[in-house]
Amino acid sequence: MDKSIKVVVTGAAGQIAYSLIPRLIDGNTFGDKIVDLALVEIPQVVDKLKGLVMELEDSYFPQMGKVTYTDNFEEASKDADWFLLVGSIPRGIVYNGKKIEERSDLLSINGGIFVEQGKAIGSYGKDNAKILVVGNPANTNAFIGKNAANNDNQLWMAMTMLDSNRAKSILAKKTNNNVSDVKNMIIWGNHSPTMYPDSENALISGDLGSSVINDMNWIESEFIPNVQQRGKAVIDARGASSATSAAKAAIDTVIACENPTEPGNCFSAAIASDGAYDVPEGIICGYPLMTLDDGTIEIKRDISLSDFAKTKFKVSIDELLSERDAVKHLMK
Ligand code: NAX
């Protein structure tokens, strides 16, 4: 087994990264491997990473390997095993003299970034590299990056684990269970307010959610909107977006990919559709996934969707298709 691993993190001076980066080297995420970190930021703030590196050095992480920081993504990409693409331009900031308000502007600007990063990952990342896009709009950023990377051996994902963890917590409270008793919490579709959190196929203390929760009104008017809008609720309460929970979700995704999934179980992330569940090929869609014993990650294909679920899922697929159309100019 390879005893060291290289992880690239973008947006490394941002708030999610501040929670995320220490956990990459704490011995929990990658076990006994030595973890080399390549931290990437935009030129305006890259120097701040010096302070973060000082803190990491001062924290005594036995698994910490070489830590570098740069604003040069190509340089950072060389021989990397994992890419955690957290950095992106958020809605509301002024970019090149224009306030970014519209989702289409956001798609376009971040799309440009992901073309460059995708090309570098395809050329310089390891052939079996895994890429987790956290920066929003995550699914479409991953779609653009994967296209630009043009390397089908690499696995591109967009993060839906935070939505899945949020949904587990709500179901656990509703059913008086511990959060660890809720498994297989699938998020179908886009990481956006159209996502479909699937309570029916969740396993709650071993039983299907559809048999445990007989309250469609609660599912439709409380559970689904609360999961979909949880990010906004955190912003309203905290005055800043989810950071520690987003970092934990990224770590959970990495751990789920690095270790075989228990038989019958699955985890949530968005990957390129191969037509599974009648989703048009190519779009990066939230699916139930499994990591096999040989490390391959596959879509779990035996989930049955109710008519209600199919209707909800379709709304999110349609949104992904419209996002795909909005970034057509970035596809070669
Ligand atoms: P911050 O604004 O604190 O940090 C983002 C950092 O990215 C900044 O330091 C910025 O300089 C950097 N950056 C921008 N463009 C870059 C580039 N081209 N290369 C390298 N770095 C770049 O945001 P934070 O709260 O950390 O959130 C980061 C992203 O995660 C946002 O896009 C946010 O919308 C997204 N989220 C995604 C979630 C998910 O579940 N997929 C949940 C949490 C979060 O909202």
Image (cartoon, rainbow, N blue to C red):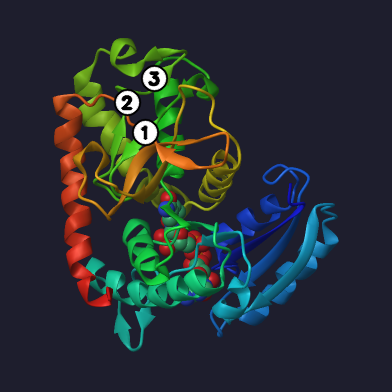
Q: CA distance from mark 3 to mark 2?
A: 26 Å
Q: Residue at x 20, y 49 (%)?
A: 280
Q: Nearer the viewer, mark 3 or mark 2?
A: 2
Q: Amino acid at mark 1?
A: Ile
Q: Position of residue 302 (x, y in %)?
A: 32, 26
Question: Circle 3 — which element?
Answer: helix
Query: Relative to 32, is 209 on the left or the right?
Result: left
Q: Is residue 280 above or below residue 322?
A: above
Quadrant where the image shows the C terminus:
bottom left
Dot 3, how many residues are within 10 Å of its Cα: few (below 14), some (14-19), or many (20+)?
few
| Residue toward you, 278 or 46 | 278
Query: Hey, which quadrant is residue 304 in on the image?
Result: top left
Q: Position of residue 117 (x, y in %)?
A: 46, 73
Q: Amino acid at mark 2?
A: Asp
| Residue toward you, 238 or 34 | 34
Q: Is residue 5 above or below residue 258?
A: below
Q: Position of residue 277 (x, y in %)?
A: 24, 37
Q: CA distance from mark 1 to mark 2?
A: 13 Å
- Among numbered discs 3 and 2, the one appearing first in the sequence: 3
Dot 1, how many residues are within 10 Å of its Cα: few (below 14), some (14-19), or many (20+)?
many
Query: Relative to 32, is 285 on the left or the right?
Result: left
Instruction: Check disc 3 and report the residue beneath it.
Output: 174
Instruction: Check disc 2 and report the residue beneath it.
Output: 302
Instruction: Check disc 1 and report the residue beneath it.
Output: 186
Question: Circle 2 — which element?
Answer: loop
Dot 2, how many residues are within 10 Å of its Cα: few (below 14), some (14-19), or many (20+)?
few
